[in-house]
Amino acid sequence: MSTQKQQPGPGAKNQRKQSTIPAAFSSSGPKYKADSLEQGTKEKVIAQWIGRTGLPARTVEDEDFILMMETFDKRLNIPKKNKINNLVDKLYIDEKHKFKERLATARKITIGLDIWTKKGFTASFLAISACYFCTQENKGKHTQMLQSDTMSLSLVLPALLDLNAHLFEFPKAQGSCYRDLASLSQRMKENMGQRFSCFLDPSDTKFSPLIAAACFLDPTVSPEALIENEHDDVQIQELLRKAEDYIAQMVSPVIREEETDDNEDEEERREVPETKRPRFRFLSKASASRPSRSSLSKPCVRQEMLKFKEQLSQPMNKETALEFWTAQGSVYQSLKPLALDLLAMPASQAFAERVFSITGDLTRGRRNRARVILERSAFLKLNRD
C-alpha cells in the first residue's frame, strides 16, 4: 500500500521564512564583551532611541523590552538605566557642543518668541527660537520647519503688496452691483494700511525697511514685486530706495570704505609737509612701499546693487534665493553675507510649537511638564547627522 507524499503548502513556506528572521539577529555564541565594538554600538543606538523619544531610561529594565532585545540578539548585554542615562547625557552634550560651534559662526541671529495655551486653558507655554544662516553648510538651504509659503522674511512684502492690489482692484472687478462688497474691500484696504504702515509706508514714523531689503535681495520675488514696478508705482519706488539705503547702511563699514571720495586721501597727503624729515626713515620707507588705501580694489555696495538689478532682468538658473547667493559669492562680495542673513530670518515666530509636533510631543502629557527630557528629546531628534 503506497501513500501519496504531501507537498508543503505556501503557508508552511512562509512559516519557514518567518522563523529565520529571529535566527538572523540571534546567535548561540557568548555574550559581547563590555568594551567590544558591537556592544558599544548597540548601546548607543538604544540610548539614541531613548533620548529622541523622551522615554524614561528605566524602559531598558522592563521585562518586555529585555525579552524583545534578546529575541533580536541573545549576545547583547542589556544595559542598565544608569548607563543609558549617562549615554543619553553624553549624546546631548556632544550635540550641544556641535551646535554651539555652528552658532559661533553666525553673523546675525534672529530671536523668535512664541506663546501658546493648552487646550482647555489649563496651562500656557513660552518657546524661544534662534534662526540664523549657518556658514558651515556646504550649500544654502532653508529649514523645513514651517512647511508653508511664509518660510522667509523676504516673502512678507510681496504677500502684502499682492493683497493690497487685490483689494484695490476688487471694486472695479465686481462692478457697481456689489456696492457692499466694494465698501468692505475699501474698509479692509484702509485697515490694512493702518496695520502694516510700518512696512508699506516709508513716510510712517515707525517704518522699518527690513522686509523691503529682504524682498529686494530675494531674486525669486524681487523682479515681480519691486523691480518691474519701480517706474510705475511711486510707493514701490520709495520702498526700493529705502531698501537700498538700508542695505548700504548695514554692509560692514570696512566694505563701504571704497565709497568715500578719493580726494579726501589726496587732501590728507597734501596737509603733510613734503620738507618734513622722517623721524624713522626705515619705517617711513616701508610705509611708502605699501599701496595706499585708495589704490586698493574694493567692491562697492552701490555698484553691486546696480549689477544685481541688471541680473534680475535675466532668467535665473538657481531655484532658490539661498542657492543663488551661495553661487554668486565671488560676484557680490559685499551683498552676499547680508543677503544670506536676511533670507535666513523667518517670516513668522509661530513655528516654535511645530517642534513639538515634529518630535511627537504635541499632545503628550510629558510635554505639559517643562522638564529637561522634553528639551533633550526635541534637540536630539531635530539635530541628526
Image: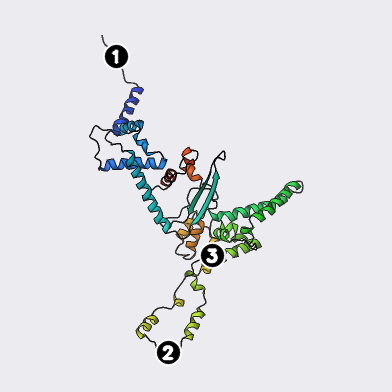
Residue 264 seen in this snapshot: yes
The residue tagged 3 is 247
Q: What is the x, y in percent for residue 297? A: 45, 73
- Identified at 53% across, 63% down, the residue is 308
Which quadrant holds residue 122?
top right
Q: What is the x, y in percent for residue 194? A: 67, 55
- Identified at 64% across, 52% down, the residue is 163
Q: CA distance from mark 2 to mark 3?
A: 43 Å
Q: Is residue 339 above or below residue 262?
A: above
Q: Amino acid at mark 1?
A: Gln
Q: Amino acid at mark 2?
A: Lys
- Which circle marks residue 276 in the picture? 2
Residue neighbourhood size for the residue with mark 2, other residues' Cα within 10 Å, grouped as few (<14), some (14–19), many (≥20):
few
- Identified at 36% across, 86% down, the residue is 281
Residue extending furthest left? 30
- Identified at 34% across, 39% down, the residue is 81
The residue tagged 1 is 4
Q: What is the x, y in percent for residue 11? A: 36, 23
Pick whichever of labels 1 and 2 is earlier in the sequence: 1
Residue extending furthest top? 1
Pick whichever of labels 1 and 3 is earlier in the sequence: 1
Pick whichever of labels 2 and 3 is earlier in the sequence: 3
Residue 233 seen in this snapshot: no
Q: CA distance from mark 1 to mark 3?
A: 90 Å
> Mark 3: which secondary structure?
helix
